[in-house]
């Protein structure tokens, strides 16, 4: 179902109209003044953030040149630490120790046992 956008020249209001399909005739009316004299405009579009933007917005640790963000050991457990902090909970010491060990290259015991 497409959404078309129209601009009202009378009151300069942008109106979005949802239609059932691209073949459905559109009878647009300004949401502000009720005018039917509207001009169809190009709709805005969504964009996705680049990996670079995600790195910049995530803060420390800084991205190292040539190092994949997800392979950087400093980033291991960051989302877990952040979630505990957001929920106002103290992270159990056992989880802190496993995250720190993983950052230092030590595999968790449960994974070592499977190997």
Image (cartoon, helix red, strand yellow):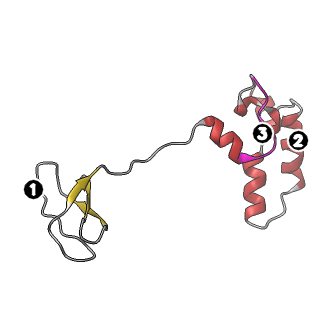
* Residue 60: quadrant of the picture: top right
The residue labelled by disc 1 is 25
* Front residue (pair 8, 63): 8
Dot 1: what SS? loop
Residue at image x 72%, y 33%?
69
Of pointers 2 and 1, the one earlier in the residue sequence: 1
Question: Which of the marked residues, 3 or 1, is nearer the chain's N terminus?
Answer: 1
**Quadrant in which residue 86 is drawn:** bottom right
Q: Element type at marker 2?
A: helix
Q: Residue at x 13, y 59 (%)?
A: 26
Q: Label 3 to label 1, Cα distance in Å?
A: 52 Å
50 up-or-down from 66: above or below? below
Q: Residue at x 80, y 38 (%)?
A: 62
- Relative image position of residue 79 (x, y in whole percent): 72, 49
Image x and y of residue 3, in percent: 27, 55
Residue occupied by mark 3: 75
The alpha-carbon separation of the residues under discs 2 and 1 comes to 61 Å
- The reply to whether the magenta stretch includes residue 107 is no
Q: Residue at x 78, y 67 (%)?
A: 88
**Extent of the magenta region:** 58-65
Please name the residue that numbered disc 2 is placed on: 100
**87 lies left or right of 109:** left
In the picture, measured across the screen, residue 20 lies left or right of residue 62, that is: left
């Amino acid at each position: 179902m497409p959404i078309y956008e129209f601009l009202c020249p009378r009151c300069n209001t942008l109106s979005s109209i949802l239609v059932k399909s691209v073949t459905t005739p559109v009878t647009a009316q300004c949401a502000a003044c009720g005018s039917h004299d509207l001009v169809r405009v190009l709709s805005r579009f969504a964009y996705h953030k680049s990996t670079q933007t995600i790195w910049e917005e995530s803060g420390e640790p800084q991205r190292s040149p040539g190092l994949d963000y997800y392979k950087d050991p400093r980033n291991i457990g960051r989302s877990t630490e952040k979630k505990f902090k957001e929920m106002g909970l103290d992270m159990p010491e056992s989880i802190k120790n496993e995250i720190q060990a993983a950052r230092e290259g030590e595999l968790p015991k449960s994974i070592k046992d499977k190997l």
